Amino acid sequence: MSLSFTNSIAVHGRARALVPLCVGAGAYLFFLYVGDTLLQDSDSFWQIKIGQWILDHQAMPYTDFYSFTRPGEPWISTSWLSQVMFALSYAQWEWAGPVILTALAVALSAAIFVYLLDAHLEIPRSVLFAMLAVVLSLHHILARPHILALPVMIAWVGMLMAAADRRGTPSWYWLPLMSLWSNLHGGFVLGLALIGPTALVAIWGIESGKQVRLLLRWFLFGVAAMGAACVTPYGWRTLLGATNILNLGELLSVISEWMPANFASFTAFEGALFGLIAIGLFRGLTLSPPRILLILLLTWMGLTHVRSIEAFAFLVPLVLAKPLGEQSPWPELDATGGESWPARYVTALGALMIVGAAWTSTSIYLSHHRFSFTMEQTPVAAIDLLEQRKAQRIFNAYQFGGYLISRDIPVFVDGRAELYGEKFVMDFFKAVEVKKLDNLTRLLDEYKIDATLLVADAPAAQVLDHIKGWKRLYADKIAVIHVRDESEGAAAPPSK
């Protein structure tokens, strides 16, 4: 009987070691299969373009050279490493490259997430949390740098929480993780901001004398982490560049991913909030004030900006893992430490088989499927016509900026809102929505626009049909082009 029980524990340990990899492989294959849905944001175009520029020039951009409205203005890329990775993958496999890279990042995120939860929770709940986190993040899983940084964010916060749960401090060996994050994406500031609240979790409930010493060690780690975040080609400028986006004021309320959560209709995020409340009530969870503070902070972020919902989805379970695990009705089985080398060999062989199966599936799928960008972001025919007419100054829709950059056409505006500033982009949006007709005509004249490229149903596109000096040249289901009507004898626009 005892031998049978020991064997079952050994089998459980080997299976448990493969669970994160299985979850990651499942996530990878799923997002590979729906890979076209990852190509829906025109920012992917300029991200790749900048990455290719960095590779071609072996240098980093410090000013803008893609727009005609902000040429030479200071601008740095806080996602340069992600952009280079996307550019390399695109050069090798076209759009299949960014899709595979994004799917791998999501897979790694899910695997790390399950591995971290596994320290406190049983396998079914860990996997369930991972599935829910991915579902909550679906709206923002795109071929863009924030996804490549997602596994780093999860690993960093998991490391902080593990240190807090054992009443210790994080090892300085983890600091390169912050350096990697700060080169991948500007969201690394969240990792720095969470050090303080997590330190409070660590010191809560211990003797006052030990609290001071432990808090000091966390403070030193925080200073070191800030220094590690500056280990980029831009140095300390990385910190300023990453925070510029947060200073855009009213503009954040009109850019879709920075908008607050909308509960006009039921959403997965709304269901997750109800579930979080239900778990607390059903399990009778008693959390320390610092842990409650962390949960409230992450919830507030998700409510304030929809792009922060994935942080809520992946990080709140890490904060709750230890309290939930302490109330688990099932005992934890841990026999991995006593495995013999044959058992480890079997585990490693199983891991290789999973990776091999995923790669074989990728090769088979790519042999008969070609990924393509969503047509709504790529007005190919319209831009072909503008190139034939040699249009120089195009008043373009916000979502067309990335594609224009990919075609080496100077843009009026694109997704780099921090470059253009709050006033400029707000004036642009008001002009496109024709909140004031003067905004539209002023911008067209001030920037000497010779053609407009707007979304087919944009109010400005309809209004331009009736403005003297402009005529509709082309229209399809994606875009509308207006050009100055020379037959009207329109006066040349005044110079700036």
Image: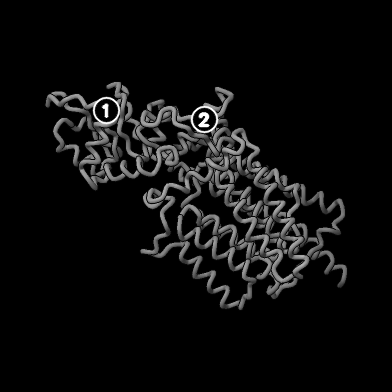
* Whether residue 213 is situated above or below residue 43 in the rendered picture: below
Q: Is residue 321 left or right of residue 212?
A: left
In the picture, the quarter occupied by the C terminus is top left
- Which quadrant of the view contains residue 167? bottom right
Q: Quick check: can you spot residue 22?
A: no
- Where is residue 310 shown, x and y percent of the image? 53, 55
Q: Residue 227 versus residue 32: which sits nearer the camera?
A: 227
* Whether residue 224 is situated above or below residue 208 in the rendered picture: above
Instruction: Name the residue that disc number 2 marks.
Output: 62
Residue type of the residue flagged with mark 2: Tyr
Q: Which residue is drawn at 24% across and 39% down?
A: 440
* Whether residue 352 is situated above or below residue 286 in the rendered picture: above
Q: Residue at x 14, y 33 (%)?
A: 468
Callout 2 secondary element? loop
- Where is residue 431 shown, x and y percent of the image? 27, 42
* Whether residue 488 is situated above or below residue 459 in the rendered picture: above
Residue type of the residue flagged with mark 1: Lys
Q: In this view, does 291 lie to the left or right of 34?
A: right
Please tell me how crowded label 1 is: few (under 14), some (14-19), or many (20+) other residues with Cα within 10 Å. some
Q: Residue 346 versus residue 92: which sits nearer the camera?
A: 92
Instruction: Name the residue that disc number 1 marks.
Output: 448
In the picture, the quarter occupied by the N terminus is bottom right
Callout 1 secondary element? loop
- Where is residue 449 shown, x and y percent of the image? 27, 29
- Where is residue 422 shown, x and y percent of the image? 38, 44
Please tell me how crowded label 2 is: few (under 14), some (14-19), or many (20+) other residues with Cα within 10 Å. few
Instruction: Please report whichever mark, 1 or 2, sits nearer to the chain's N-terminal start.
Output: 2
Q: Which residue is drawn at 18% across and 31% down?
A: 470
Which disc, if any, is residue 254? Answer: none
Q: Quick check: can you spot residue 79?
A: yes
